[in-house]
Image (cartoon, rainbow, N blue to C red):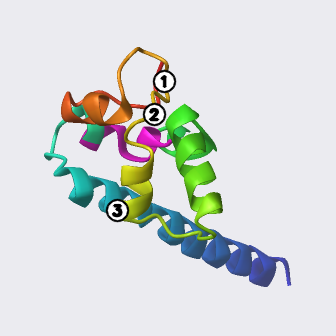
Amino acid sequence: MRKLALIIGLVGMAFGAVGFGTMSPVFNTTYGVKKGSNLDNAKCGVCHATAKGGKLNPYGEDLAAAMKAANTKKLTKEILVAVEGKDSNKNGKKNIEDIKADVNPGLK
C-alpha cells in the first residue's frame, strides 16, 4: 500500500512539474532567448528564486499579479508584455531592458 501511495505521489509531482515547466518556453519564444545565454541558463529562475523553481522572485510576482488580473493561470505573450514596463528587480531599468540585455529581470 505504501508503494502505491509513493507511486501516485511521484506521478502527481511529475505532472505538476510538467505543467509549470511549460512557462519557460513561452518566455524563451517571446523574447528569442538564445541557448546558453544568462536567461536560458536561469531556467525557472527567471520567475522563481532558484533555477529549480520554488518561491517567486519579484518578476514572477509581477507576472502572477498580471495573470490574476487577466483571470488566467496560463502564461501568454500578452501577460509577458503587460509587465515589460515594470522594474521588478528595482535596478532602475524596465523589465524589457533587462531582458534585451540578457539580465534576469527578477534578480536584485
Q: Image height check: is 51 above or below 73?
A: above
Q: Nearer the viewer, mark 2 or mark 3?
A: 2
Tell whether 66 sits left or right of 21: right
Q: Are marks 2 and 1 in contact (CB under 8 Å)?
A: no
The Cα–Cα distance between marks 3 and 1, rounded to whole angstroms, is 20 Å
Tell whether 14 sits left or right of 1: left
Where is residue 85 drawn, in percent x and y? 39, 37
Q: Are marks 2 and 3 in contact (CB under 8 Å)?
A: no
Q: Secondary structure at mark 2?
A: loop
Count of marks placed on residues: 3
Where is residue 93 drawn, in percent x and y? 35, 21
Where is residue 96 drawn, in percent x and y? 30, 36
The segment highlighted magenta reads 40-47
Q: Secondary structure at mark 1?
A: loop
Which residue in the structure is indicated by mark 3? Answer: 77
Outermost residue to the top: 92
Identify the residue at image location x=56%, y=54%.
66
If the image is split into quadrants, where does the N terminus sit? bottom right
Q: What kind of residue is marked 2? A: Lys
The Cα–Cα distance between marks 2 and 1, rounded to whole angstroms, is 9 Å
The secondary structure making up most of the magenta span is helix
Tell whether 20 sits left or right of 97: right
Q: Is residue 38 visible?
A: yes
Label 3: few (<14), some (14–19) or many (≥20) C-alpha neighbours in 10 Å: few
Q: Image height check: is 78 above or below 41?
A: below
Which residue in the structure is indicated by mark 2? Answer: 86
